[in-house]
Image (cartoon, rainbow, N blue to C red):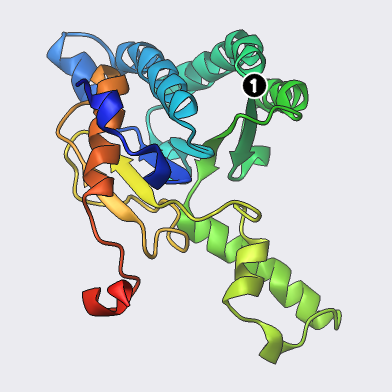
């Protein structure tokens, strides 16, 4: 029995988030520039998206570019943006063919105009697809997300649309960039780093973490299956005891 056949399709995480880490180290091991790692990471993205869609995962969120990444060398950021534009342009037709909808979260207004244009066009092309939603986190950070939600809620309170004592977790969730999506049940991080790097800070409150030493460009379908199988072996208690779950 292969790994895919071991996955319990009745116990799939509806939403999987991925911190795609290790591109630079992958390239360095091979004597290449960091952009070489980013270029070779595209196949890992294709493989992961395809595997998730085939299994029936509803949402797959990829941490593609954080707000902190803007502080990287100008040459690397510029090359990344160029790669992003060309990749989105090439993959839009494939997403439609596979009935996958593209969405984005983050401060996308800070992206180059060409990136914004390609994103908008790809999202428009795929907006009616229903098999799976692929979410690209671009110029995103969890603190930015919570901050912009608080600003918008404060504006609603100031205008009298919401009373201050009516602001609860459900209200906050409606103003986050992930509004309308289920919180991730599984977070995968490659490269072995033991942190969440300012990603989905609110949404990851009860997410199961799966950390692998594998560098992102080497990630393939079987590695996604391994992560899901690890998730399925866990007991999700949400603050309750094991005994309470069996009653």
Residue with the most extreme front position: 247
172 vs 156, nearest the viewer: 172
1 vs 13, nearest the viewer: 1
Task: Please indicate, yes or no, whether residue 183 appears anywhere in the rendered image.
Answer: yes
The correct choice, above or below, for 57 with respect to 41 in the image is below
Residue 206: image quadrant is: bottom left
In the drawing, does residue 2 fall left or right of residue 144? left
Quadrant placement of the N terminus = top left
What residue is rendered at 49% in x and 56% in y? 183
Task: Please indicate, yes or no, whether residue 22 appears anywhere in the rendered image.
Answer: no
Residue 33: image quadrant is: top left
What residue is rendered at 13% in x and 15% in y? 29
Horizontal and vertical percent position of residue 188: 31, 41
Q: Which residue is mark 1?
A: 99
Q: How many numbered dots are placed on residues in this image?
A: 1
37 vs 110, nearest the viewer: 37
Horizontal and vertical percent position of residue 105: 59, 43
Q: Label 1 neighbourhood size at 10 Å, few (<14), some (14-19), many (20+)?
A: some
Quadrant placement of the C terminus = bottom left
What residue is rendered at 23% in x and 15% in y? 27
In the drawing, does residue 229 fall left or right of residue 62? left
């Amino acid at each position: 029995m292969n790994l895919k056949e071991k996955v319990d399709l009745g116990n799939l995480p509806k939403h999987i988030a991925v911190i795609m880490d290790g591109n630079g180290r992958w390239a360095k091991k091979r004597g290449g520039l960091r952009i070489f790692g980013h270029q070779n990471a595209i196949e890992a993205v294709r493989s992961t998206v395809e595997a998730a869609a085939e299994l029936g995962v509803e949402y797959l969120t990829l941490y593609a570019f954080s707000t902190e990444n803007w502080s990287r060398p100008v040459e690397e950021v510029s090359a990344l943006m160029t790669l992003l534009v060309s990749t989105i342009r090439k993959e839009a037709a494939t997403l439609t063919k596979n009935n996958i909808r593209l969405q984005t979260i983050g401060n996308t207004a800070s992206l180059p105009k060409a990136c914004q244009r390609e994103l908008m066009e790809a999202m428009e092309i795929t907006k009616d697809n229903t098999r799976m939603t692929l979410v690209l986190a671009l110029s995103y950070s969890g603190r930015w997300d919570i901050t912009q939600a608080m600003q918008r809620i404060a504006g609603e309170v100031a205008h009298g649309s919401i009373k201050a004592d009516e602001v609860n977790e459900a209200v906050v969730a409606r103003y986050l960039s992930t509004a309308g999506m289920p919180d991730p049940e599984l977070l995968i991080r490659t490269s072995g780093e033991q942190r969440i790097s300012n990603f989905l800070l609110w949404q990851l409150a009860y997410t199961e973490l799966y950390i692998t030493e594998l560098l992102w460009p080497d990630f393939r379908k079987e590695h996604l299956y391994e992560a899901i199988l690890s998730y399925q072996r866990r007991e999700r208690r949400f603050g309750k005891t094991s005994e309470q779950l069996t009653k």
